[in-house]
Amino acid sequence: MRIPVTALFVTTMALFSASAQAGEIAVIVKTVNSTFWQNVQKGADAAMKKAAGSDTMTFQGPASESAIADQVNMVENAINRKVAGIVLAPSDPDALVPAVKKAWEAHIPVILIDSQLAKGSNQYYQSFLATDNKNAGELAAKELIQKVGQTGKIAVMSYVAGAGSEIGRVGGFTDYIKANSKLEIVGTFYSQSQMATALNQTTDVLTANADLKGIFGANEPTAIGMGRALVQTGKAGKVVAVGFDGNEDLQGFVKDGTLAAIAVQGSYQMGELGVENVLKIINKGKVDKFVDTGVVLVTKDNIDKPEAKNVLY
């Protein structure tokens, strides 16, 4: 079956030597319109090149992270194509379960990256590779408490409510704040992973809370929108801001002091290890049920050091 390239998704294919036994590895992420997921693709491409086999790879994602039905269709289409394996970053923990179950019933191995599926679905996938999002949220919370102190107001700018990574990350952040400080949390606000929405929401929060001491932006587009709002309102460097993920925009905000820190995931590693693990399963190898792909807190002090450069993109 030929895969169309539409406005909804982009497909890239890595072709190696032809073989009757060649299979397709379908990598399906939350959106192709983000440098975070593009960095996942780089890792996946690298794993395919390293394998140097006859398998091919397709890389797809909806136009936005909130286009959940489009992602479900992509998984179902991959199953209908009888792919050899699927690497999936599920946009919604519940909506993707039936599709992943179909893959399991079709004996197609599934590796999850970045976000978990709903409880009770563990049997349908073989491995989950992700940041320990609870730990990452706690890391961001510790940094914010260290910078703003124990009292005052902070705001939480999140992305898609209910996404597996969001539950762990923002939950870990807010739980740590509540357990270890007397800070008052304003929000949570959901940008749907749209930078412009995050900018407008942050501007509104800053306007409504002149005494705001700190703010947390929980993923790449949200943190970029948050940073731009801080600059536009003249609050950059005055309100302590901690972001998440590590593209060039966010690196710039750290360097100029708009953001005090960014918690950066191993996005490249998710793509690379996701493909490596699905190939292992196809070749009858064993994989761990959970693999922590790590997180690094990047500040102005360490942004040019190897520990940061290894995860920034």
Image (spheres, rainbow, N blue to C red):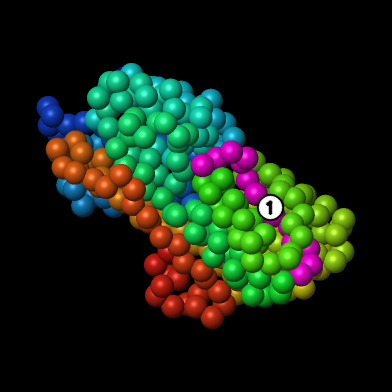
Left or right, 286 with respect to 115, comes to left
Q: Position of residue 231 (x, y in %)?
A: 75, 65
Q: How many marks?
A: 1
In this view, the residue farthest toward the left is: 20
Please report the residue visible at 37 percent of the width from the left and 24 percent of the height from the top. 101
Residue placed under numbered mark 1 in the picture? 157
Please report the residue visible at 28 percent of the width from the left and 21 percent of the height from the top. 106
Element type where label 1 sits in the image: strand
User: Which image quarter: residue 214?
Assistant: bottom right
In this picture, is 313 found above or below 171?
below
Q: Nearer the viewer, residue 214 or 76?
A: 214
Magenta residues span: 151-164
In this picture, is 274 found above or below 313?
above
Q: Is residue 120 magenta?
A: no
Q: Nearer the viewer, residue 128 or 225?
A: 128
Q: Position of residue 107 (x, y in %)?
A: 25, 25
Q: Position of residue 292 (x, y in %)?
A: 37, 55
Q: Position of residue 272 (x, y in %)?
A: 31, 51
Residue 196 seen in render: no
User: Which image quarter: residue 4?
Assistant: top left
Residue 180 seen in render: yes
Left or right, 66 with respect to 1, comes to right
Q: Is residue 155 magenta?
A: yes
